[in-house]
Amino acid sequence: MSATTIERLKFAYRRLRVGANLHRNDALGALFRAWAYTHATQLTGDYYEFGVYRGNSLAHAWLCYRHHRRHLERSARLPYRRQGTVSAFLAQRPRFYGFDTFAGMPANLEGEDSLAGGSFLASLAQAQARCAAVGLKAPDLQLVQGLFADNAAAIGHTHAAIVHVDCDLYSSAHDALTLIAPRLVQGSVLLCDDYDLFRADNRQGERRALQECADHVGIAFEPWFAYGAASRAFLCHVPTPASAAQP
């Protein structure tokens, strides 16, 4: 059996088991909870992932989205009608964006062997194939290759419902948050996959980048839940123009 066939079988199994991810305390469980939240609150918007690697979490995000959408569309047990805000929510179809250099980790001064330049190397073709295996393809999928800072034009015009930052380094997280901050709205979900790396040092990594983003744009990031070994989920509180103008 070829490696490609094995990968397809793995994702077929995940598709069948996606509903069991609610109680997983890892990135897959976090994505399941995030999509459950957007459907419970009818929060429209696109999915953004910074740090795609081989495309596993991007593909799983799609599976979680499809699971919750089908439940909202088809469940006979829902105690409300699918009209008004629910109908408007279902009329919107999110796009899935994945940003990565596909050249491995950039050279950095973080001092961690596991994050050395060139590590986590995967190709654009690998990520495309992994996503295609679960049915995620263009136009629903847009993979963007290159440095985050060089690809501001690739950010969509629709606001972001869920943002998954999985790029470890301060510089990469800073660039990702700078790009996506204008698309965050009240209630947007931010998943920081490496928030507590560097022994939870506020002067390094995603912790530093998130605090600087909050200070610069005035968004409050409310801690939602922890997951995995060093990951955190946040809910975004975006000031209105009136509140932002107050001293």
Image: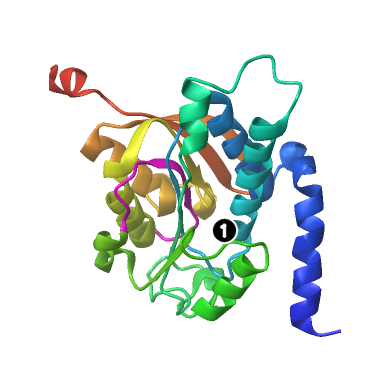
Percent position (x, y) of residue 1?
Answer: 86, 84
Q: Residue at x 23, y 37 (%)?
A: 217
Is 65 located above or below residue 43 in the figure? below
Q: Nearer the viewer, residue 166 or 13?
A: 13
Could you tell whether 135 is left or right of 172 in the image? right
Which stretch did the figure color magenta? 155-169
Q: Magenta stretch containing residue 230, yes or no?
A: no
Could you say whether the residue bearing mark 1 is in a helix, strand or loop?
Answer: helix
Q: Residue at x 42, y 54 (%)?
A: 205
Residue 147 visible in rendering: yes
- Specify the quadrant of the image occupied by residue 243: top left
Dominant secondary structure (helix, strand or loop) of the stretch shown in magenta: loop
Residue under label 1: 58
Q: Magenta stretch containing residue 168, yes or no?
A: yes
Could you tell whether 202 is left or right of 242 in the image? right
Percent position (x, y) of residue 231?
Answer: 57, 46
Percent position (x, y) of residue 203?
Answer: 37, 48
